[in-house]
Amino acid sequence: MVASMKIRTVAAIALGIAAPYAAATNGDQLLGYTAIQNGMAGAVVAAPQDAATILVNPAGMAELDIKEVRFDLGLGFLNPPRSVNGFNSDSDLYAIPGGAVAFRVNDKLTLGMGLGGLAGSGVDFPDTNAAAPGNQFVVTTRQMFKIAPGFAYRVNDQLALGATVNLNYQSLALAMGRPAGAGGPFYLPQNQVFGWSASAGLIWKLNPQFQIGAAWTSKANMSDFEWNTAQGKVSMTIDGPQTLALGLAWKPAPGLLIEGDIKQIWFSNVMDSIATSRPAGSPVPAAFNFGWSDQTVYALAVQKDIGADMQVRAGFNYGKSPIGSADVNSNIGSVAIVEKHLSLGMSRKFSSKATGSLSFVHGFEESATSNVAPFNTIKLKQNIVNLQVSYQF
């Protein structure tokens, strides 16, 4: 009985470590790419405000108040304290860069390019099960970025369309320890792959007070990860999910903006089960059965002008965790269970061309315990600060 429990615990650790390692996120998807977007809790599909809209809704570039060009550069710092069965991760601070540029070619056409982190972070658990012999350490690093060149085209005063072709980059490293007799530890060093996806969006102005936004991103088709090990070559593929977002922006008074967004993320198509190709005798499991469910995300935010040079914003973002109780044991290395986020932000104009922005997002602590043996418990909360510098003329 004890031996059986140990084997199940070891299997759970093995299954958990290859999952995405969430940042301040819905599942493993970032709320926003810049301080402005995070200050709005990700509710920026219908009323985009910076060049990084190319990473969310490319049609939004047509809505930017620029004559020639706008640059937006930002850096985020993520603090996601996590634990498994009371063991804390020693890795809890990460940097998240992001930026974009938009060029107004003429009254109809705007070109742009953006770069932002889609998912990433990692875990560094010294142990995950005190009852098993030896240290069941789990150490991981994963990064995923998107480079998105694209365009926005203003059809008329009411309608704008946009699209991008996205170059996706992903890196991954995995290391885990297991008791003697359970296959032993395995180490898959840092490796990287490329892939692609496409995005499209629209902005439709119903009247001076209301406008609608919609944005779609296809599944990110990634190349196979491949590692050379002592037993032979190991490989697997981790794709990114398809998403669809709808937003409604309301401007009830001058200097006041309210926006609500709904976003669907199809995690089940890419994070249900991931098969591995491995040689005989490899300690790597034959498949990582994560069991992620699709996620519906709701975001609501308010922005208010304070005089001519300052804006303040606040928002709330909710998405039910894609990881259920039945899947906890398969996601020990992917504690992507935060559901509720509260955001605050502000922007300050330093001149007619330069603006600085700051945001803070708090993901409220969540815990989940497996409803099947072994009864592992995972916990996570998140804090992220974003800084942004904007320049336009």
Image: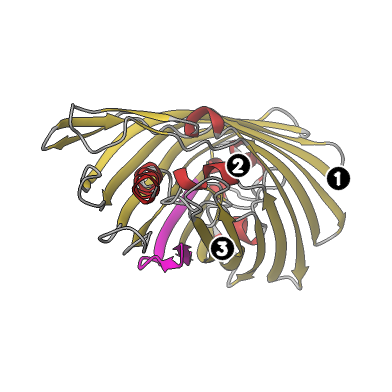
Quadrant where the C terminus is found in the figure? bottom right
Q: Is residue 326 left or right of residue 101?
A: right
Q: Is residue 342 magenta?
A: no
- Rounded to the nearest angstrom, the CA distance separating label 1 from label 3 is 25 Å
In this view of the protein, which residue sits in the foreground, 277 or 208?
Answer: 277
Q: Residue 322: name its quadrant.
A: top right
Is 194 in front, or is 104?
Answer: 194
Q: Are marks 3 and 2 in contact (CB under 8 Å)?
A: no
Residue ID for mark 3: 353
Where disc 3 sits, the SS reads loop
How far from the left and from the top, in percent, is residue 367? 58, 59
Residue 239, x across and y down, in percent: 43, 32
Say left or right for 102 vs 343. Answer: left
Q: Residue furthest left?
A: 230
Q: Main secondary structure of the magenta part?
A: strand
Tell me if I can see residue 175 in this picture. Answer: yes
Decide which of tag 2 and tag 1 comes sooner along the chain: 2
Contact between marks 2 and 1 (CB within 8 A): the answer is no
Quick one: label 2, few (<14), some, or many (20+) residues within 10 Å? Answer: many
Residue 268 — which label? Answer: none
Residue 61: assigned label: 2
Mark 1 lies on residue? 208
Amino acid type, callout 1: Pro
Q: Residue at x 31, y 45 (%)?
A: 172
Horizontal and vertical percent for residue 283?
23, 38
